[in-house]
Amino acid sequence: MSENNLVISIDAMGGDNSPRVVIEGLAIAAKKNPDIRFLLFGKEAQIRATLDNYPQLQRVCEIRNADEVVRNEDKPSSVIRNKNTSMYMAIDAVRKGEAQAVVSAGNTGALMAISKMVLKTIQKIHRPAIVSMMPHINGKYVMLDLGANTECSAINLAEFAMMGDILARCALGIARPRVALLNIGAEEMKGKEEIHKAAQMIRNSHMNIDFIGYIEPHEIPNNKADVIVADGFTGNIALKSIEGTARLVMRMIKNAVKGSFLAKIGLPFMMGVVLRIKKTMDPRLYNGAMFVGLNGLSVKSHGGTDALGFSVAVNNAASLVRQNFVATIRNEIEKIDLDELSQEAIYDLY
């Protein structure tokens, strides 16, 4: 492979319908990104059987055989040190500098654990986080943490704010993202002490973040903030609540149309609107959660996604690599001392 190309490492055996969906997704991504080359890790015979159907894609792929696979039911503790799985080998290629990012649709816990062990956390970052992009009424926002850390200190939340700010600039093209802490109320006295301390740290730091304070869950879809920061437990519940509500709304619209003769007559006139709403809510277009705070970019695709969804995850990884996302986090964190700010925040609260 040419050294001038952007190289993405792929766990070809991750996901519900691998390697077929993975290969089909790469074919879509390759058309949009002619500068990308792929390292495919997995069972070579199975990969090649599908890849042979895509002669153009074959030219930009290199297959590396991996006899073992991380299954969805595997516990991270049982696979984290197995260097013979397709997931481990794909992540290790980033550590070795053979690829600039890794994408997998496999076991989330295992991917997070292996990525953290192999790639290591960026110096001065206390904990990595899971972050994803979601739709609001006028565009997209990023939210983190989505499950990597069920409990977080003020320092963790402040670091998440910084990393989310950088991601929104790189992935969403927002020059100065509005950053908010997810809380049970907008008032200063509401919520846990860690949130109050994090707010003080962000305000007093040299992060140059447009921090707008607290945001309540019902305000998330209203384009009030571009970056939503929470601990992993709260963020994961918020994410799943949003996803469940979105599916409910779509089902209710579908059932309402089916149950009304007048609605069926008027549907052709509303088809354009319905299709726009459906596209906006399509989870495939927001596929690809990033593990941020590591010395390398690791992207998690939804295990049950189709080829389009997997291609979106690959596109997101490529876009962040082009914008030096990991290096930007590393450079920004060097400018501040959050441990010192944590002590200052404690004094400010009392």
Image: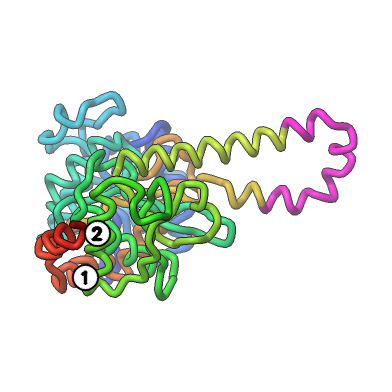
Q: Is the magenta region chiefly helix, strand or loop?
A: helix
Residue closest to the eye, 75 or 65: 75
Is residue 291 shown to the viewer in this render? yes
| 189 over 173 or under it: above or below | above
Q: Residue 339, located in which quarter of the rendered image? A: bottom left
Q: Indicate the secondary structure of the residue bearing disc 2.
A: helix
| 341 over 155 or under it: above or below | below
Q: Residue at x 89, y 32 (%)?
A: 261
Q: Residue at x 81, y 28 (%)?
A: 259
Marks 2 & 1, CB-CB < 8 Å contact: yes
Mark 2 or mark 1: name the one nearer the start of the chain.
2
Which quadrant is the C terminus positioned in?
A: bottom left
Q: Which residue is denoted by mark 1 in the rendering?
A: 205
Q: Indicate the secondary structure of the residue bearing disc 1.
A: loop
Read off the magenta span.
255-276
Q: Specify the amino acid type for callout 1.
A: Ser
Q: Specify the amino acid type for callout 2.
A: Ala
Please say whether residue 272 is one of the residues in the magenta stretch: yes
Q: Which mark is residue 314?
A: none
Q: Which residue is denoted by mark 2 in the rendering?
A: 158
Which quadrant is the N terminus positioned in?
A: bottom left
* Residue 308 position within the rendered picture, expressed as x and y whole percent measured from the top left: 50, 48
